[in-house]
Structures are given as C-alpha cells and as structure tokens.
Amino acid sequence: MSFYNQIPTDQNKNPKRRLPMRNWINFYVFCLLLVTAGCGPDGFNPSGNVDDEQIAVNVEHAEADMVAVLSWTTEEPMSSRVEFTDDMEDGGTYHWKWYIEDEELTTDHEVKVIGMVPEATYYLRGISEDEEGRIESAPYFFETPAPPMDIRAELTASDPDQSQDGWWLASVASDTKSSIIRPVIFNEDGEIVWWFDPYDGAEGYMSYETTYQDGLVLYGGSIPQGERPVAVNLAGETVWEGVFSQPTDIIDHGTLHHTMYWTEEGDIAGLAINFAGNVISDVVFRVDPDATKLEDGSTEKYPVQDVADYVLDMGPYVDYDNGFFNNGVSFSKDSVYYYHHQGDALVKVNQDNEYVWTAGGTYGEFELINGGWPQKAHGMEVTEEDTILFFDNGGPDINGEFNTRAVKIQFDENDMTAEIVWQFPEPSSAAKEEMQTPCGGDADQLPNGNVLVATGIDNAGFPHRIFEVTEDHEIVREVTLTGEDIFGVYAVQLIPNLLQEIEIE
C-alpha cells in the first residue's frame, strides 16, 4: 500500500519559498503551516493533516493505487498546483521535476497526482497562486506500491523525433488462470504509471477495451455476465455507469464484448453479447451518457436500451446459423461498420439500419485486388471515409499458423474494388513470426500518421509488445512486457501526457 506523510523537521527546508503579501489572513495561515511543520513530533501526523485549525495539505491514497490526491483550502480564490519529485538531497534540498496544475481560481483545492512509477518514494507540495502572490505547503512524501501482478515493462525502442507524443492506455491481460484484464497506463519512457482493478482482482473479470477522454477512463466487463460500462476518474472514483438491466428482444443482459469507446459526439458506443434463445450473438449499442444526469450533476444507473440512440441486431447480414461474434464496430459520419469474427466479413449499414454492403466472407461484394482479406480480426477503425485499419489476426492457415498484421484497406464503392494500401509486417518480413496471435490485438491510427499496435494475447512464445510503427515500417517506440503473469495486451490507445516538466532556470 502507499504511505504518505509530512516531511519531518530536519528535512523541511526550502529557501525559495515566497509569501503572498495581499492579505494578512493568508500570511497568518502560512506562518501556522511553517510552525506546525517545524514543531518536532507533534508535526508528524500519519494522516497528512496537522489539526483542524492549522491544515496545510491533506494527502489521500486514491482507489487507483498509483494516484495521490492532495487537497487544501485558501481564504481567497487561487490556482491549484502540485509539484513533485523523486530527488531530494541530504539536508532537505528538493529538485522539483514535475507538476500538475489547474489554473481555475477556487478556495477549495484538489489535485490528483498521476505519473509516479511503482515502488518509489516521491516528495510533493501544494501551491496556490494569484496575481498578487503565492502560498505553498511543506513537502510531503508518498510511497508508491508494487503492481498487483508480476509484469515488467521495458522501453525497447525509442525515437522521439519520429514518435507521437503521449502516454499509452492498454488493456493488459494477466493471471491467466483467473482471466483478469486490467486498464494500465504507460508513460513515454515505457514505465507503468497507473493501473486500476475494477473488481479488486475478481476472477473472470475481463476489461477487453478501455478508453480515455477528458480525465476519465471507460471500461467494461466481458465476463462474467451482467457487467456494465463504467467510467472512472484517475483516482478510481466511478462517475458514470450504464446497465443493460432489462431483457429485450435484442439485449438480455449487459455482458460487453471486445469494443467500447467514446464517439466524437461524446456518446458511448460498443458491443454487447446476447444469449437469447441459446444463440450467441452481438449487438451494437450507442448511448448518450448524459441522458440520466440529475439536476445536481450526479448520475444514476439506467437500462441502456431505454436511452439508446442506436441499437442494431446484425444477424441478417452474416452466414452463421449458430450465433456469431462481432469483434469491432466503428461509427463514421452517416455509416456504421462492424466486423463479424466467425464469418470474416466487414458489413456496412447506415444509421437507419439499412444494409449497404459486405466485404470479405461468403457474401462479399468487393474484389480485393491485392493480398487477402482479414481473418478473425479484432481491432478496427475508420481512418478516412473510404479506408479502414484492422488488427488482422490472420488465421489460422492450413498449417495452423496466424499471419497476424496491422492492415489498411481502401474501398472504392464505385467499381466495388478494395486495395491493401499499407500493412505491417510485410508478408516476407522477418517480423511476421513475432506477430502471431490467435486472439485480441489492436491497431490505431495516430495523428502523426504512424500506427499504434498491441500484439494481442498468447503470442506463440514471443514477448508481448506495444509499439508505434511508421508508414515505412520502422518501429519508433516500443514497450516489451515480461513477467510470470503477463498473458498479452488486448487493446491500446494514445492518451495525453498528463503531467508537465518543470523548467530548470
């Protein structure tokens, strides 16, 4: 577990501290802070507080193990900033390295600190500023825990000039006997800086897809039945959840499957499994997460189908009598694309549930002029209106091998032809063998034109990887995962770098 406390007297020195001069109230509070921090044993309080009348900064351990939550109050509205470091010299000299800041002026301050690596000691201080001055706390220390699984991450390739800035949020599979897939965040150095156990490591919990937007992580359970889409903040606090609670002719419970994400409009889209009539099938859902917001801004659970903008049963368009799985769905302007796993078919419909075309599979209407259609693909996204990027598991072929790849296919609806315009690895590449995976995997288009890849589950004895590759097939950033518990990486997404470096003058 994490531990946090105010630094004892002999380490609590900072010659650069400046006092605000606007009013004597802030000055008095600040003096109390300094006196309390320097009063020997009475100033050493395991809660991170001093006492109710002399509060400096309260440090709490968040539900998400790697996050520290710092809170404090000021008499006047001021900004909220936390600076932190892992570098302290003997005698109490701190070399502050990073900060997280909210410039909105308030009297009640709270900052969630993310970006620390496991099993390390950090020093943190709270700072508030306005145009007339600045007030800051004494330093506190915070010890980060070890990951809940034996997984080690190593940056095995890095070219900052060619790679996309940002962190990676991944669905990491571990503990294969109990089948657990957790959301995990890696920084630009390939280090684990955040994870979340949605059900405290409950056996059978699989969060196949996790996605990030505006400080929230969206995840959904696939097994056991009845799980639901949930959004948590970086502290691990639930801020939204939806439930498929009432059986219908389409959805009979809330087990989610493979794909879920925020659309550009802010809706939540994905796939849910339907076992009605002993036939396994998938349905597409799209919901407005704001539909059940209460007047006070809180949310309540609700049956997703009651507020669904779009729920579509895909059964009529595939050749599979005993049920089917859809492994991908992508909404694009006026169209919806989904990929049918058993039938190896891509189906396009419009938003009115009207069939447009099928590519691949038994009833495919397109001629692919080069290479082969994806087989048993998982990740899928529309990168342009006529181009789709797949994570193609590729098999198995007649030899039982998987020709796994990330592949872009461009579709020409005028003459009903399709063309592979990019793939990695190339069929003749030596990297082909290391990409083999029968399950999972993801490929995302990045803003700089590169492609972000997660290599899936059970990689035929090869290391499990997340990497960024250029159009010229050069890997410019790569994280390799090892350890007794690692079983693969199901999906990955680029997210912003959530902390800033302090410029040294």
Image (cartoon, rainbow, N blue to C red):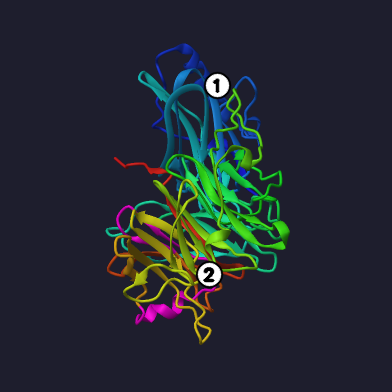
Task: Residue at the far top: name it.
Answer: 24
Query: Mark 2 against mark 1, which lies toward the viewer?
Result: 2
Q: Secondary structure at mark 2?
A: loop
Residue 345, given in percent of the width and then of the height, sits at 48, 67
Q: Which mark is residue 343?
A: 2
In the picture, residue 190 is in which quadrant? bottom left
Q: Is residue 432 magenta?
A: yes
In the picture, residue 22 is in which quadrant? top left
Q: Earlier in the sequence, mark 2 or mark 1?
A: 1
- Whether residue 411 is visible to the viewer of this picture, yes or no, is yes
- Front residue of 138/413: it is 413
Residue 78, given in percent of the width and then of the height, sits at 44, 22
| Placement of 428 over or under 217, stated as above or below | below
Q: Which mark is residue 72?
A: none
Query: Which segment is the magenta one?
Result: 427-453
Check disc 1 and report the residue beneath it.
Answer: 32
In the picture, residue 52 is in which quadrant? top right
Q: Residues within 10 Å of mark 2 (few under 14, many from 20)?
A: many
